[in-house]
Amino acid sequence: MTSDTRNTINIVISGVGGQGVLTLAEILAKTALACNLNVRVGEIHGMAQRGGHVVCTVRIGPNAYGPIIDNGTADILVGFEPVETLREIATIKPSGIVLLSTHVQYPVAVSMGKSQYPSHKEILSEIRKFTSNIYEIDAMKFAKDAGSSRSLNMVMLGAIIGTGLTPLSKDAAIEAVSKAFSKRFESINTKAVESGYTIISNAIA
């Protein structure tokens, strides 16, 4: 798949504070700018403190005049956690792709016994009401294999590029990553990007 003829690519990123949602959006934007593409980034709602719901939008293309992505218009929904994916599922278009990190991070209310976490089957059933294009990723495993659980967001960056829906190249993304992190963490994050890219590009091919 390619998006060279597309006017605008809409990406919604959903997670919780502390997972690196904002960092992923920032590096996507820097990658787009390095490719001389117009880009708009927005934090729609949520608190960035650890554990709070965070949603970022990234729009890439000549017709991306603002950061708002209306329901039913997202090309890619990136979920850092199953329930966090489900929270924003209404944004995806029927032909859009959902990239779902399968690692569960229980909300405070669930940990305190005040609410119940839905089963994975229930989550997938709800998502399929909006799109059948769901790619599950054990992103935490790949992040740990790369050298740090904190590189989960870079696994998801690679997965986004691997869909082929964006006009961004893997090389440009890795270059942006190398500039964003110190040498100490560059190899870890680069490996994480590569793993995310490989699993999704192979799954879609």
Image (cartoon, rainbow, N blue to C red):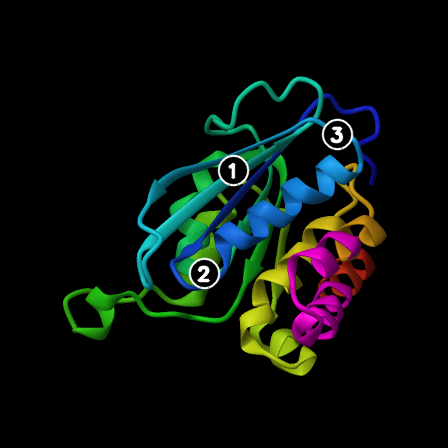
Residue 44 is covered by the magenta coloring? no
Distance between mark 2 and mark 1 Cα atoms: 18 Å
The image quadrant of residue 49 is bottom left
Q: Residue at x 34, y 40 (%)?
A: 45
Distance between mark 2 and mark 3 Cα atoms: 31 Å
Judging from the image, what secondary structure is the residue with disc 2 in?
Answer: helix
Mark 3 residue type? Leu
Judge from the rendering whether residue 153 lies leftward or rightward of residue 107; answer left or right: right
For mark 2, what is the residue?
82
Q: Main secondary structure of the magenta part?
A: helix
User: Is 184 rendered above or below residue 161?
Assistant: below
For mark 1, what is the residue?
57
User: Is 196 rendered above or below residue 35?
Assistant: below
Label 2 crowd bin: few (<14), some (14–19), many (20+), radius 10 Å: many
Judge from the rendering whether residue 201 lies leftward or rightward of residue 40; answer left or right: right
Which of discs 2 and 1 lies nearer the camera? The answer is 1
Residue 188: % across, % down: 69, 74
The magenta span reads 175-195
Q: Tag 3 or tag 2, which sits nearer the N-term?
A: 3
Judge from the rendering whether residue 36 lies leftward or rightward of residue 118; answer left or right: right
Residue 97: % across, % down: 63, 44
Residue 57: % across, % down: 51, 38
The reply to whether residue 87 is visible in this rendering is yes
For mark 3, what is the residue?
37
Q: Residue at x 66, y 73 (%)?
A: 185
Label 1 crowd bin: few (<14), some (14–19), many (20+), radius 10 Å: many
Distance between mark 1 and mark 3 Cα atoms: 16 Å
Mark 2 residue type? Pro
Residue 86: % across, % down: 42, 50
